Image (cartoon, grey):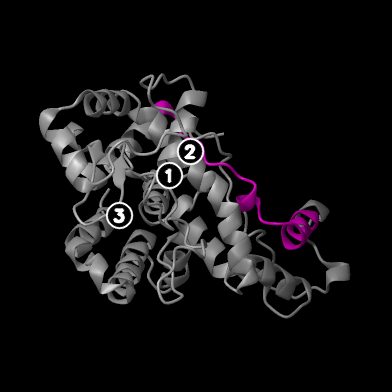
Amino acid sequence: MNSFGLRRFAPPSFEEVNDFWSIAKGQKSAKKNPFYPLPTTHYPLSYSRYPLAIVLLLLAFTFVPSLLSASELRLSDAQARQIAHRIWLNEGSGKRSKLVWWNKGEEFASCGIGHFIWYTKDKPMWFWEAFPPMLRFLIAHGAKPPEWLTPETHCVWNSYEEWRRAKRSNAPKMRQLTDFLDRTKGLQARFMLKRLNDSFPRILAYARAHGQGRIVEANYRRLLFRKDGSIDPRGAYILIDYINFKGDGINKGERYQGKGWGLYQVLTRMDPRDPDPYHAFSVAGKKVLERLIHIAPPERRLWRFKKGWFNRMDTYTKP
């Protein structure tokens, strides 16, 4: 086990399994097989020199669901804090004053290190409202919110103007909520990690149903696993950050002109010829976000956020 709680082993890709079958059937030289260094002579399966254990292992990978769909990414406290800090730099420049925020022109508040959406009672929208389940997670793990705040509480400011007045006056609820979110940043990172763990099996099922399962799984593996099978911390940061930033991409309610902009869309657009998975994800992410800006209703004025969004994608290419 490594420090993330996962075994240092990445399951073979579909291409590697196909290589195995080609060798076993005598259609390809065994010297190209990545699992076992055999002589280059062809052997039919019935006379193969493959150990039985290797054959059974590869059969298992062929006929059972991928281990990725059952694996759970785990982080140490230090790793969670590091990722939380990077995400908070993306969302609020690392400033305490932005833990309770409201972008002018938007219909909702954005709270916490992930700027989790929090709707007012009268203006719910179709985007996933992340603040209530985040708060529920924090409470379940021992956090004590202000007495007036529960997962069922709607945003206590009904408009940008109300929020702005509370911000300027440092009103009691503004101050109490800011303090609460400031002292629970580590748990908020854990919530974002849970979201990725909960979402990826659904993303993979959706991808398979739409003929994209292999590419989504392969690109997820490229980011999450190093060549030696250990977890890649930067890849973990990218996946956790993007799904928090723009969602999983499979929610039919999060569509403009029938097109999404979440993690699924980026994973399907990564260039397989790019040897650098971080760069490939960053480039694909920019393309997806550029399309989002063009297809969104003009009144949302998403072009305002392009520079910040692209800067965020650039952090994926930096250690």
What residue lies at 53% left-to-right and 65% top-to-bottom?
Answer: 216
What residue lies at 71% left-to-right and 57% top-to-bottom?
Answer: 65
**Does the magenta-highlighted stretch encompass residue 75?**
yes
Task: Point out the image quarter for the N terminus.
Answer: top right
Query: Is disc 1 in contact with disc 2, using a CB cutoff of under 8 Å?
Result: yes
- Secondary structure beneath disc 1? loop
Give the spatial CA distance, label 1 vs label 3. Answer: 23 Å
Q: Earlier in the sequence, mark 1 or mark 3?
A: 1
Q: Position of residue 307 (x, y in %)?
A: 17, 62
**Label 2 sits on what residue type?**
Pro
Q: Position of residue 247 (x, y in %)?
A: 43, 55
Classify 183 as above or below 237.
above
Q: Position of residue 85 (x, y in %)?
A: 28, 36
Pick whichever, 235 or 22, lies toward us: 235
Disc on res. 133:
2
Query: Is disc 1 in contact with disc 3, using a CB cutoff of under 8 Å?
Result: no
Q: Earlier in the sequence, mark 3 or mark 2?
A: 2
- Secondary structure beneath disc 3? loop
Point out the stretch of residues depicted in magenta.
Answer: 55-77
Give the spatial CA distance, label 3 vs label 2. Answer: 27 Å
Quick check: 181 left or right of 153? left
Disc on res. 130:
1
- Secondary structure beneath disc 2? helix
Disc on res. 316:
3
What residue lies at 80% left-to-right and 55% top-to-bottom?
Answer: 56
